Image (cartoon, grey):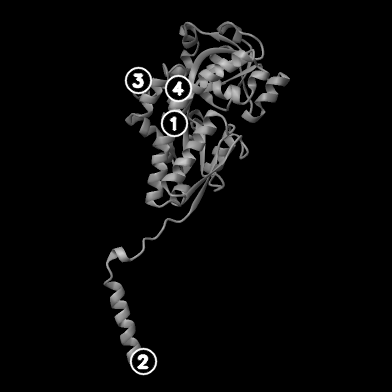
């Protein structure tokens, strides 16, 4: 009986081994849920960009990768989110982070994107983003050993100063307390404009403006509106000192959870979301300006940026030191 059973088992094994590969069912990718942190509301430009990315990832992976977006800063402000990701906490897998936030973590070349008055317009930025240099800078956080890597670029439009009292020119900023994030380039720029750089967490900015802790701040127009800063600071001077460019980052640990096919789908979704953002950004900004003007916001145009650029010459020169070739390459793309 045992010999018979052994013969039967051997025959079954031989038959299984000789089955054509098509007859062996493919292993499905494991289901993965990635948590995405976004400090802005769901209906904002960046909220909608995140939603476009989520939709495309889940479509391309047939739902095997799900994106759980946490909007409105519920997982913390940008600095807290970045600290969590770099610290390896494992609770946040993806986040949209302003490029200047990476400066304090050693992403030196990426800091060039925060240098005042670098980009002449949106087209200039997207030409850079699509270039080899743009791809290199996306890789810098990973190469620096931060445990995160750039997936794709997004932008929120140019950043402008807004204040609780009307200003008509550069001279009116002197002595004003202007909120900045904890970023040396931003601080240096505000100092160059003869204002007082004051570090305030983004989540506390509305109350800081309403209580007089600061006299003003700077943000892209879409963020200015979506966070209702116009209610407490209805005067904006459109100097366009930097473009509000950002990267969507993913942790190395999150990438390790993905199969090759899933990782490729996430990368493809990133390209889609980047294009979605580029198409939507200017359209939303123009809508915001019209709505803000109707709500009583007074915009002051800056016709000539020469004196602003000259005021920031020191921080521009010190920020590009040792990277002059890269910086010139960016300027030459306009």
Q: Nearer the viewer, mark 1 or mark 2?
A: 1
Q: Nearer the viewer, mark 3 or mark 1?
A: 1
Residue found 71% across the figure and 18% down from its top: 212
Disc 3 + disc 1, Cβ < 8 Å = no
Position in image of residue 150 (x %, y %):
43, 37
Q: Is residue 302 visible?
A: yes
Q: Nearer the viewer, mark 2 or mark 4?
A: 2
- Mark 3 and mark 4: span between their CA atoms? 13 Å
- Mark 4 and mark 1: span between their CA atoms? 31 Å
Q: Is residue 159 visible?
A: no
| SS under mark 4 | helix
In this figure, which residue is indicated by the disc labeled 1?
Answer: 276
- Name the quarter where the N terminus is drawn: bottom left
| SS under mark 3 | helix
* Res 2 label: 2
| SS under mark 1 | helix
In this figure, which residue is indicated by the disc labeled 3?
Answer: 328
Q: Nearer the viewer, mark 4 or mark 1?
A: 1
């Amino acid at each position: 009986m045992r010999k018979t059973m052994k013969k039967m088992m051997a025959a079954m094994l031989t038959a299984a081994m000789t089955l054509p590969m098509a007859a062996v069912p493919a292993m499905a990718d494991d289901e993965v849920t990635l948590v995405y942190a976004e400090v802005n509301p769901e209906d904002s430009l960046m909220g909608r960009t995140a939603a476009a990315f989520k939709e495309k990832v889940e479509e391309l992976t047939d739902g095997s990768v799900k994106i759980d977006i946490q909007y409105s800063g519920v997982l913390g402000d940008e600095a807290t989110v970045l600290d969590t990701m770099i610290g390896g906490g494992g609770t946040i897998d993806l986040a949209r982070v302003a490029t200047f936030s990476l400066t304090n973590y050693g992403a030196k070349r990426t800091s060039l994107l925060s240098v005042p008055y670098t980009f002449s317009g949106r087209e200039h930025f997207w030409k850079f983003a699509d270039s080899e240099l743009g791809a290199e800078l996306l890789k810098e956080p990973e190469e620096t050993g931060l445990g995160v890597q750039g997936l794709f670029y997004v932008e929120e439009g140019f950043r402008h100063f807004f204040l609780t009292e009307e200003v008509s020119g550069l001279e009116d900023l002197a002595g004003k307390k202007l909120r900045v994030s904890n970023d040396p380039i931003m601080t240096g720029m505000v100092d160059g404009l003869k204002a007082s750089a004051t570090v305030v967490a983004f989540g506390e900015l509305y109350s800081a403006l309403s209580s007089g802790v600061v006299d003003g701040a700077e943000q892209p127009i879409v963020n200015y509106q979506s966070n209702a800063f116009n209610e407490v600071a209805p005067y904006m001077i459109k100097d366009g000192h930097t473009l509000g460019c950002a990267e969507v980052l993913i942790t190395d640990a999150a990438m390790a959870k993905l199969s090759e096919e899933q990782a490729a789908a996430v990368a493809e979704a990133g390209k889609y979301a980047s294009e979605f953002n580029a198409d939507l950004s200017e359209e939303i900004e123009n809508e915001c300006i019209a709505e803000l003007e109707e709500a009583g916001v007074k915009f002051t145009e800056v016709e000539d940026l020469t004196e602003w650029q000259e005021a920031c010459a020191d921080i521009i020169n010190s920020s590009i030191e040792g990277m002059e070739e890269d910086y010139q390459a960016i300027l030459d793309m306009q």
